[in-house]
Amino acid sequence: MRRRHRHSDTGQAFPIYITVVAGLLFLAFAYLAVGQAAVNRGGAQTAADAAVLAAAQNGRDQLAAVWTADLLDPAKWKDVFEGNVPVDNPCARAEQLAAQNDATLHGCNWQLLRYTVDVETNKSVGDSVVPGTESIHSTASATAVIEPRCTFPGDAVGDDELPLLTCGGKPWKLDPDDEATLPAPEDLFDVHLADRQANHE
């Protein structure tokens, strides 16, 4: 009689065991889905960061080129360092960087020294126990700013003398006849991320 009772208990426990194991497996797959989503979202943010930095660096290089062209006209320097000069569309480079990170550029805007992009991952989150994830793509936005690193006297100087330009604490003795001695774009401007945000769609 006791032996039959033990067999009965074992038979009753087996369905509970199966239920517990099934629940644990579901939780494991759910955590995997969360991980997949996090990886996808991280990829979107990486693409957005790379794209906006590429656009801002392109803008910085254009500003530096304008400054070099206007080197002999210091009255124009202020506009250059404030970004208040025409800049050709820098978004082609942003589109390239987004594509290199397996994403598509959906928006690229700039105003003076501030650049913003929006991207979407080409790959979805993927199949999981969570319904609908196979059609969900991550999106991300990022903003970068160009920050002038240089200061110079606002007062006029002699016709044959350019203002003393100080960039990052380093004074530059400007020689218009020797471009090799002029500051590089990264000496004139710093480019860095200012804001970033990733989501799912």
Image (cartoon, helix red, strand yellow):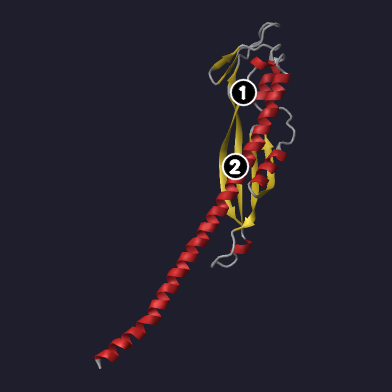
Relative to 45, residue 82 above or below: above
User: Residue drawn 32% across and 88% down?
Assistant: 8
Label 1's element? helix
- Give, as a three-letter code, the residue at label 2: Asp
Label 1 is placed on what type of residue? Answer: Leu
Residue 130: horizontal and vertical position, in percent?
54, 66
User: Residue at the bottom extreme?
Assistant: 1
> In the figure, 127 relative to 189: above or below?
below
Picture quarter containing residue 60?
top right
Q: Which mark is residue 49?
A: 2
Residue 64 pos. (x, y %) = 68, 24
* Secondary element at image label 2: helix
Q: Position of residue 146 (x, y in %)?
A: 61, 31
**Residue pictured at 70% horizontal, 38% vertical:** 93
> Residue 173: which quarter of the image?
top right
Question: Mark 2 Cα within 10 Å, few/some/many (few <14, many 20+)?
Answer: many
Residue on which the image places disc 1:
188
- Please give the name of the residue rendered at 65% of the width and 43% of the height, measured from the top-left corner: 117
Task: Check the picture and name the quadrant holding the C terminus.
Answer: bottom right
- Tag count: 2
Residue 142 located left or right of residue 92: left
Q: Which of disc 1 and disc 2 is earlier in sequence?
A: 2
Q: Residue furthest left?
A: 2
Q: Residues within 10 Å of mark 1 (few under 14, many from 20)?
A: many
